[in-house]
Image: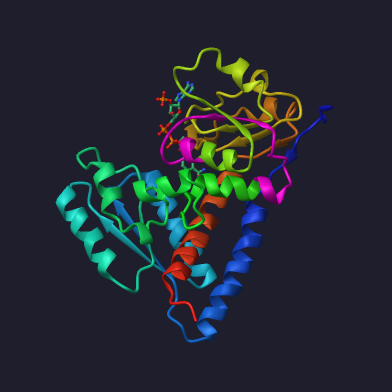
Amino acid sequence: MTSPATACILDGKLTSQNLLDSLSLELAQIKAQGAPLPKLVVVLVGDDPASQVYVGKKAKTAQKIGMLSELLTYPADTTQAELLAVIARLNQDASVHGILVQLPLPKHIDTLSVIRAIDPKKDVDGLHPLNMGLLMTGDPSACKPCTPAGVMTLLKAYNVPLAGQNAVVLGRSNIVGKPMGMLLLQENATVTYCHSKTADLAAVCREADILVAAVGVPNLVTADFVKPGAAIIDVGINRLDGKLVGDVDFTSASQKAGFITPVPGGVGPMTIVTLMANTLFLYRQGQPTA
Ligand code: NDP
């Protein structure tokens, strides 16, 4: 494959807007039929400034497309028992179709216990072990984690070849890295996971036709990590000197890559639109079929 001088930008802003427009139409149809609208509830505990920005964006997007949404905010000293009681109430509430607990939670709360408490049928970020298991087995009823599912949508929107390609996923978190690899595998990519103990990271990454960086280390991926013509997906969101940067050094990597996502305007908007799509997906799964 010959390397283009500059990479094609995988525009998450544009792609997500197109998807939001079609979700908007679907929601208008539901409304016109007089059926109850899908409802997303986002739960925020504490005052992490980045989380506050994310939940604000999520609620605003839901509103824009005509989906019902509610943001529940609780102080940082909320106990685990109090949070579990909130989730139990939302699980019981038939008007709620998607529950998202914004991560990270304050340190005194056990994240896994909270995720396990969410009804898997309302687990809009697909993090409950049941949904993880369904994803692992390729079950179509799995609700897929928003960020990796959004990345797949973006890759497909730009017809990035997947089958038979070498995909390297940098990062192995439950929320991004692990499910990302599973989704690429389902599309018949040959998947390698890298993490903090990987020996010679750059050499492994240079084998990648598709490289997904989800580490949280600003500008870790430089041109030296990039195979000419590769698709580079930057999941990272980091603040550096007051600026938002990804895990990829965009300037150098984009000279070698075939496709690349910018930060901001790449994966971030795809995560949000996938959250909306997942809420609608869970809503439809819960509706009686005619
Ligand atoms: P985690 O901190 O949970 O996981 C980071 C992963 O990166 C771990 O597997 C870790 O390895 C690995 N890692 C860390 N440092 C290195 C290194 N120097 N070399 C190789 N691997 C390393 O992060 P998340 O998965 O939650 O998030 C990753 C990034 O993505 C963050 O910047 C986050 O803000 C962003 N993010 C963006 C979203 C979006 O919508 N755009 C959504 C979610 C997250 P090990 O397991 O060995 O510790």
Residue 48 falls in image quadrant: top left
Ligand 1 location (quadrant): top left
Tell which of 92 and 260 is nearer to you.
92
* Residue 279 showing in the rendered view: yes
Where residue 106 sits in the image (x, y, percent)? 25, 41
Where residue 13 sits in the image (x, y, percent)? 63, 52
Where residue 233 sits in the image (x, y, percent)? 61, 37
* Residue 264 showing in the rendered view: no
Residue at (55%, 34%) from the top-left corner? 246
Q: Quadrant of the N terminus?
A: top right
Q: Is residue 141 left or right of residue 188?
A: left
Relative height, residue 2 to residue 270 (above, below): above
Is 164 contained in the magenta span? yes
Give the total of numbered labels: 0
Is 216 contained in the magenta span? no
Residue at (68%, 23%) from the top-left corner? 226
Residue at (41%, 44%) from the top-left corner? 50
User: Which portion, as a residue range, is magenta?
Assistant: 155-179
Q: Is residue 30 left or right of residue 7?
A: left
